[in-house]
Amino acid sequence: MAKVVVVYHSGYGHTQKQAKAVAAGANAQLIAIDAQGNIGEADWASLAAAKLYGERVAAIANQLRG
C-alpha cells in the first residue's frame, strides 16, 4: 500500500486532473470518493496505512462504520 494517498471528489473532472497531478508528483495512491463521500473497503485500508494521518483516519473510519 502507498504511504501517501490523495483523496478527491470531482464533479466535472477539473479536480480529478489536479489530484492526478499531485498523486503523480508524490508517488501516491489516488482514491476517488463519490458525491456522498463514500469509498470502498480497500480504500479505507489504504487510508489507515497512509503516512501521517493513518491513525487518525483509522479512528474516524471506525466511528463511521459504527
Image: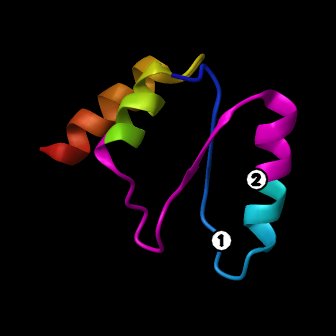
**Residue at 36%, 30% in the rendered image:** 45
Quadrant of the image occupied by residue 8: bottom right
Q: Quadrant of the C terminus?
A: top left
Instruction: Please tell me which residue lies in front, 6 or 58.
Output: 6
Q: Position of residue 54 (x, y in %)?
A: 47, 21
Disc 1 marks which residue? 10
Label 2 belongs to which residue? 19
Residue 17's image quarter? bottom right
- 45 left or right, relative to 13: left
Circle 2 — which element? Answer: helix
Q: Indicate yes or no whether the magenta region holds residue 25.
A: yes
- Looking at the image, residue 38 lies above or below residue 63: below
Q: Is residue 26 left or right of residue 2?
A: right
Tag 1, which secondary structure?
A: loop
Q: CA distance from mark 1 to mark 2?
A: 9 Å
| 1 and 2 marks in contact (CB < 8 Å) | yes
Residue 3 x, y percent position in the rendering? 60, 19
Q: Which sits earlier in the primary sequence, circle 1 or circle 2?
A: 1
Which residue appears at 41% of the width and 18% of the height? 55
Name the kind of residue labelled 1 in the image: Ser
Q: Is residue 61 magenta?
A: no
Residue at the spot 86% in from the left edge and 48% down from the top edge? 21
Q: Amino acid at mark 2?
A: Ala
Which residue is found at the position 65% from the left and 71% from the top? 10
The range drawn in magenta is: 20-41
Q: Residues within 10 Å of mark 2 (few under 14, many from 20)?
A: many
